[in-house]
Image (cartoon, rainbow, N blue to C red):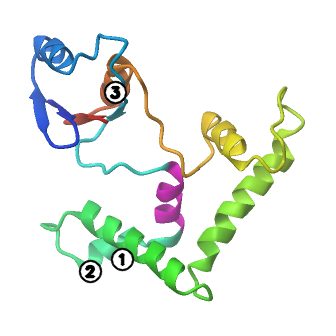
Amino acid sequence: MALDYKDLNNEYKIKKVIDIFKICKKFNTFKSDDVWIFRGESDYNWRLRTTFERAIIDYFIDKKKLKEDFNDSTNIEEKVQEALERKLLNWKSDKNSQEKNIIEFEKNLLRDYQRKSRNVMKYIPDQQNWVEWLATMQHYGAPTRLLDWNYSFFIALYFSVEKATSDCSIYMH
């Protein structure tokens, strides 16, 4: 199992623990005045996707049909990404299309969360402050358009290897 470390333009293979510290030193991730953010992924082949995008894939895209349409040599992840992009582009260009359900799906998630969480939350965001609501939803595991990043390389490292069964990756921005 290898760990890949990706910044905007480069990719670095990590095979030994010492490689982790070399990369941290190279990018000065130990200094508090440098601002880097990191995200760990437990599968190298995964694209950066929000939980909302994953929910759209699960709800609107027939992965079984995609696998049937393409032979095993085709990377199914690429086909899923293409299907997701088509769904989102169609939704933007044709407001009357079936993809309108995506926006309704998101609105219903937010509305249901706001309604059901009021009895258990100590702090309740303002009804109109949807960013705070999305952050709260994200914190408790609901699908949102937010993507978790971290200021700590080592926390991203933990999330990348925690459930990894093959090569994993850390993104840096």
172 over 46 or under it: above or below: above
Dot placed on the residue nearer the N-terminal end, 2 or 3: 3
**Residue shown at the point (33%, 17%) measured from the top left:** 154
Numbered mark located on residue 36 in the image:
3
Residue kind at label 2, given as amino acid type:
Asp
Can you say which quadrant of the picture contains the N terminus? Answer: top left
| Tag in front: 3 or 1 | 3
| Secondary structure under the numbered disc 3 in the rendered image | loop
* Rendering coords of residue 126 (x, y %): 83, 42
**Residue shown at the point (32%, 71%) measured from the top left:** 82
93 over 18 or under it: above or below: below
* Rendering coords of residue 67 (x, y %): 28, 71
Q: Are marks 3 and 1 in contact (CB under 8 Å)?
A: no
Residue 42 in view of the camera: yes
The residue stretch that appears in magenta: 51-59
Between the residue at mark 2 and the residue at mark 3, the CA separation in whole angstroms equals 41 Å
Q: Are marks 2 and 1 in contact (CB under 8 Å)?
A: yes
Q: What residue is shown with label 2?
A: 69
Q: What residue is shown with label 1?
A: 65
